[in-house]
Structures are given as C-alpha cells and as structure tokens.
Amino acid sequence: MPAVADRGPAGWDRRIDGALTGVVELCGASSGCLYLLPEGEEVLHLTVVRGLPAEFVAPWTRVAVTAPVPVADAVRRRALVWSGSQQDFAREYPRSAVTMPYHFALAAAPVEADGVCVGALLLLWPSAHPQYLRDAERAVVTAGCAQLGELLAEAAPAVPSRPRVLPLRLAAAKLPETAGRAFAERLPGGSCAMDLNGRIVFLTDTACALLGAGPEKLLGALPWQALPWLDDPAYEDRYRAAIISREPAAFTAMRPPDRWLAFRLYPAGDGISVRITPTADGPEPVPPSRPVPVSRAGQIYQIMHLAAALTEAVSVDDVVALVAEQVLPAFGADGLALLTAEHGRLLVTGYRGYSADAMARFEDIPLKVRDTPTLRALTTGIPGFYGSSAELAEAYPDVPQVTGKQAWAVLPLITSGRPVGCLLLAYDRPHPFAADERTVLTSLAGLIAQALDRAHLYDTKNQLAHDLQQALLPHTLPAVHGLKVAAHYLPTTRGMDVGGDFYDLIRLGPKAAAAVIGDVQGHSFPAAALMGQVRTAVHAAAGASPEEVLVRTNRLLCDLDPGLFTTCLYAHLDLAAGRAYLVSAGHPPPVLRPPGGPARVLDIPPGPPMGIDPDAIYPITETAFEPGALLLLYTDGLVEAPGTDLGRAIAALAGQLDQSLSGDLDVTVRELVARARRAGRRWDDIATLLLQAGPA
C-alpha cells in the first residue's frame, strides 16, 4: 500500500517517475520516456521524459498507434522492439531516422495493465552499447513495464498538456568547489559545463575571455542564443549528437572578426563538459553569394518530421493536429489557425492558442473581401509577415486587433495554382521574422497546402461512404413485445472504404421476431451495395422457416453472381414458447446467457457462406430463449485480430458478456465494443446485436 505522501495525483506522479528512473538506471540506459494510451484513444501521449531535453522529443509528444515508429510498433505487436544501431534504425524507421541521424541503441516495450495495453516505454542507450540487448537488460525492461503497468492500473493519471521532464542532477547553483575551479583554470584553454538542456552552468575565466563575454551574460544561457556567431544549426547539431549518442563531438567556429576556436564536447549522464582552445585553422569560408542559414536545428528537425508525417495524414483533422504539434514548437508560436476556402468563403478548419470567440471573427468571410491579411494573402498568393501590432496597424489600419497577439505570419496555402486555404501563426510578443525564417515558413506552407488538399478529398469520400453505410443500415429497430434490443455499429479505422457488416430485426407477429446479422466480404462500395441486397432478400423471405430464409437468400446471391460471399446468422425468436431457432451461413456462433448465467457460446453447425453454392443447405439449431435470457449476435470484428486465436477469442467473449452485463443493454453492448478496442481489435468493422427476452 503506498505511503500517505504518495497518495493523490502528485503522489502517483512521484511513484511513476521513480519507476521510470529505476528502469533507466538499472539497465544502463541514457534516457527514457513513458507514453500513455488513454482508454478509447489510438494516440500515444508522451507523459514523462528522463535524460533528454523536452525540445529533443517535441516531434514525438503524440504518436498515433498506426505510426511507423518504435513505440507504436511495440503497442501494435504487444512485444519489445529493439534497434541496436543507427543502421538498424534507419532501415526499420527511415522517417524517424531522418530527424534523428545519430548513433544510439533503442528499445520500446508495451506497458500493460490487466491484459490491456495502457502505454509504452522507450529507452535509449549510448552508441557504445552492443548491437544486441543483454538478457539482464531485457529482464529489467520487462520488470519495469510490469511495475509501471501496476501503477497505472491503480490510478491512471491524466494525460498532461506537455510531457513532464524529470529534473537533472546538474544545476547552475551547484558550481564546483574552489579547488576544482582552480584546477580548471590551470588547464590550457577554457572550460565550461552545459546541462542536458544546453544551458551553460559553469565556465572558467579563460573560457569567458576566449568567448568574448562575461559570466553574467553566459551563465544559464544557450550558447547559440547568447553568442550570435555560434548561431548556426551545425553547431547545435554537434551538441545534440553528443547528448543522444554519448560520444565526444567537436567543431570549429570563428569568433569575429578572425579568431578561430576549437570546441570539444565530452558528454556524460548529467551534462556536457566543453574544452575551448584557440586554433589557427578553420573550415572553408562560405561564399558570399550563398546565404548562411541561421534557422535553429530544432526547427529543421521539426520541419523534416512534419514533411514526412504529412505524407501519411489522411483527414483534415490529421493535418490540423500535425501542423499544431510540429509548427508551434518549432517556431515558438503561441497561436495557430488553419482556414480553408470553400464555396467562395473562408472557413475556420482548426485552431490552437485562440479562444472560440476570437475565431468567430475569422469565420465565414466572403473571399471577395480583400481588406484583411488572411484574405489578401489567400487571393494574391503573397505571404504576410507582421512583427508587431504596429506593423499590422500600418498595413491594415481598419482591422481591429482584439486577440491580444503581437506578431503574425499569414501564409497562403496554394497547390496547383489554386488557393485551398490560409495558415495563420501568431505570437504573444513582438517577433521579427528573419529572412531565412520567412523562406522556411513559405516552403512549409506549400507542403501543408498539398496535404490539406489531399485531406479534403479523403474527407469527401469518407463522408460519402459513411452516408451510404448509414442509409443501408436500419435507422431504428421495430418494437417487439417481450423483447429488448440494443445494436451498435463501429466502422474500422483502417481506411476510408465503406464496410459490409449489417444487422436487422424483423417483426414477424405479436410474439415473434427475426434477428439477423451478417458480413459481406471486403470493404468497398460494391460490398455495401451487396449488403443492401442481402438485407432486402432476408426481409422478403422472413416468415418462412429459418433454414428456408437462408436458402432463398443464397440462391438470389448466386444468381446475382457479385463475386463476393456473405456470412450470415439468422435467428427466429418465438417469444411465446421461449424458444430460438438459429441457422448460420459461415458466421461466428452467437453467445447465449440464460437467466442467472453464465454465458456460453452456442454450438451452431454452420452452412457455407452465401453466394458460393446455389444448392447449399443450412442446418437449424433450437435452443431455449426464456424470459431474462440474453442472445448476442456479432460480426468477426468484435473478436478477430492478427495473431489472435479466433476460437479462444470467441470463447473469451462469453466471459466478457458476463463481466460487462448491465441493467442497460446499450451500456452492455458499448462496453463489449470498448473491450475489443482496448485489446487492439480494430482491423475490421464491428456490428453487434444484443437481445433479451422479457415477460411474454
């Protein structure tokens, strides 16, 4: 039982932080990250980081379970993922390797609680680590994941808006003792120390003299911000390489006007020691005709990651989320709005850092109006950069400034010469836009425009598929005296195609009904159309004996020869007699829970799927269906998943029905579907039909 101090949200955080720290230290890793997978979501959220600056992991603060990255693979496979070298990492994860071109070893493992995946653990080792994972290290990782799973099962913490970075041991207040300082001063050249965030926490007088700045300017600062001549992404990249690979790194830089300095970086678990010495030689000078890039290395990595991620974004919501997650931290912006041009008007598609009231001012503006920065950028194709409210007021004196922002980048989104929208970046403080930053943002807008255009096409097709699916499924189920019914349909998240799962309830008389559930092969519009034909055929034949209903429907499908087969389960419910008569055309067997339980899977001899053999016969099975009994019909999406034994999954469904049982049938059905989602079974549509016999 946890101590009193460890109860409550703060206490749980301390225990989780301690568990993560223990895993990192016991297995000799240089850094570790804990991701959470909230119930009902398919996105991993970075929650705790140890041993790395938050900036390094910014591109991976939210990771879709379907993404091609190690933590997502670990969750999908429910197994440890290992990458022992940079070559292995680049081969398995080329998109991530572009933004992490360093030497390191990596392990990712799922964190499970009560058999459900609730997160993932990511660990990095220095480049000196062997290319294989030692047995002792694997045991530590496995035990650590189990401990984290137990903690998360006790009280799942809320997902933070930003990952929690565990404090580093080295801090500016902990300077060396007098003897240590004297020793460092006696060494040739200058010495300084940086924490893992890149901030200078100690430097000698000699280092100050070589750098040309005093301790009041340098202590606590990032070198590339305090010293303009070190403001080059190549230098920051050497620091990143040293932190991640734990290998020494070096570079040469010129302190104006003509003094070359050699920097040697020696990383450790709590920071970097730097030796600075004068040198006579430096790299070849950059030709004057070629501009020297001054964009931050972090921005470059963010942009590369965004460019790769946008190729996989399928919906408009995906594009909005990716742009918000990557662009805002990369450029230090505080607000973002994505506006799209539709039917001659400018509409708000998504935003971050603005209030809903502020966004209402941007909504539904006719494109013929050109007296605002967004509309002018969209209609002319020329981006607008306003580093202060004064600059904006000078350009647009009639535009009210009511959002409280102080600087803006207004980027037109144009693809194939056609405007599709506008991206607005905003800052809470004045922000001068350097020439290279304007260039990068303008190029980035082109990538976003292409992704947004593709996403609009996807959403249009997806909406059409959804509308067709809903039109073919019953809007309401008929009321039958003595029978309670709950139905639920959940389309797959695998793609945009419409599915062929269906269900129906047919009233046959005052005390009789027919329940049917089925699955047409494939995910396509022809599958959906065939599904509609099957439902119509079953309706037309309902009232005949159960086996005859499937025989007639099967003959019709064979005559139509659609090239697709259909599985189906048909149940004739005689509520007056308390009996059910069932026939199956290759469909998963139903689950019956008699009054008082327990639930069991019914043994229904199946006939072949419909649409294959016109002379097929379908055996009938009779069972009791007394008042209080429950009958669960479902499609295979509820139980089927890659790597899962279908027979065992169906057998487990009976126990899940007992556990999920509620006085409300709708709640019971949704809990069954939620269990399947938590277990990762989202590779197919899920249709469920739950029936309960009541007093006749």
Image: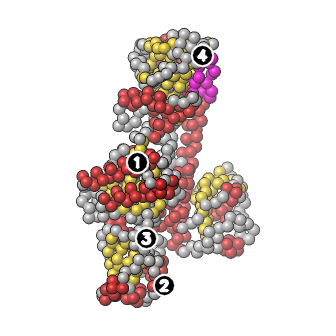
Closer to the eye: label 1 or 2: 1
- Say which of 16 and 474 sits in front: 16
Residue at mark 2: 216
The answer to whether mark 3 and mark 4 are in CB contact below 8 A is no
- Neighbourhood count class around disc 3 (C-alpha, 10 Å): few under 14, some 14–19, many 20 upward: many
Is residue 6 in sight in this rendering? yes
Image disc number at residue 695: 4
| Residue 419 rendering spot, x and y as whole percentages | 61, 57
Q: How many marks?
A: 4
Q: What stretch is highlighted in magenta?
A: 473-489
Residue at mark 1: 149
Between discs 4 and 2, the one toward the N terminus: 2
- Neighbourhood count class around disc 4 (C-alpha, 10 Å): few under 14, some 14–19, many 20 upward: few
| Residue 155 rendering spot, x and y as whole percentages | 48, 48
Residue at mark 3: 197
At 40% from the left edge and 48% from the top edge, which residue is drawn?
A: 149
Between discs 1 and 2, the one toward the N terminus: 1
Element marked by disc 2: helix
Q: Is residue 131 left or right of residue 286?
A: left
Q: In this view, does 470 lie to the left or right of 99?
A: right
Image disc number at residue 44: none
Between discs 1 and 4, the one toward the N terminus: 1
Image quadrant in which you'd find residue 272: bottom left
